[in-house]
Image (cartoon, rainbow, N blue to C red):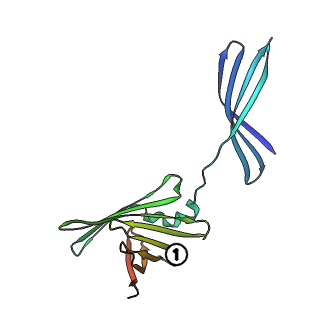
Amino acid sequence: PKLAATTESIELVSPGVALERGTAAVTRGKDDVAQSRYSVVYIKSGTSWLIDRVTDEEIVVPLSNYEHLQELDWLVGDWVDDGDGITIETTCRWTKNQNYISRTYTVSNEEGVKSTGLQIIGWDPKARQIRSWLFDSDGGLINGTWTQRDDRWVVQSLATLPDGGTGSFTSIFRPSDDGTFTWGKINRVLDGQ
């Protein structure tokens, strides 16, 4: 193992006591690096400084599932779909540590806002796939499973309606090179119909 330490500060607490703070990294192999924050208390003895105590605390690097979700980076941004008297405004943002994409939407027409919702898109480590959970303002819940197929994303969705009914549908997202994307639903089933 190799140890590398970086001193961030040295503070003279009193004429005979100093406090050093910094970070350390212990490397045991190419992908085996442990980082920690440390502090050392020095006591002056005659003309020498002796170590009184050393403490360290491991730096926990938050895990990120970005590597699994980065193919959806095109979805992040503000989107407007305006046509046939209906406007859909969508905002997609990465959450902290890029573990999820938060997607909010508003559907409105000339009479005002008809519905809103929140969708969370993330990596399911147990199933090893991208999944989503959508909560709409009517009280519905939609679970989706995302799969990339060639130039598009196919989302198989199962819905629980506010009255307890069930439904399913397939959404298809197709990003294009001009910074836009198309979206559609097919195979819509409501309570078996």
Quadrant in which residue 140 is drawn: bottom left
- Judge by depth and name the residue closer to the eye, 152 or 166: 166
Total numbered badges shown on the rendered structure: 1
Please rate how many residues cluster around mark 1, counting C-alpha atoms within 10 Å: few if below 14, some from 14 to 19, many from 20.
Answer: some
Residue 85 seen in render: yes
Q: Is residue 72 above or below residue 164?
A: above
Above or below, 134 against 186 in this view is: above
| Image quarter (top left, top right, bottom left or bottom right) of the N terminus | top right
Q: Residue at x 23, y 76 (%)?
A: 84
Q: Percent x, y for residue 46?
A: 80, 11
Q: Position of residue 11 (x, y in %)?
A: 64, 21
Q: Quadrant of residue 85?
A: bottom left
Q: Residue at x 38, y 80 (%)?
A: 185
Rendering quarter of residue 91: bottom left
Relative side of 17 to 160, left or right: right
**Residue at the farthest bottom position:** 193
Residue 125, x across and y down, in percent: 61, 65
Instruction: Name the residue furthest front.
Output: 163
Closer to the camera in the image, 116 or 110: 116
Task: Tell me the quarter of the image containing the C terminus.
Answer: bottom left
Residue 175 at what x, y percent from top left? 43, 72
Query: Residue flagged by tag 1: what amino acid is it?
Result: Gln
SS assignment at label 1: strand
What residue is disc 1 on? 148
Q: Is residue 45 above or below residue 32?
A: above
Side of 38 relative to 95 (left or right): right
Which residue occupies the foreground of this view, 38 or 7?
A: 38
What residue lies at 71% left-to-right and 17% top-to-bottom?
17
Q: Kindly give the residue lying farthest to the left in the view shown.
A: 111
**Can you see residue 79?**
no
Q: Residue at x 39, y 75 (%)?
A: 164
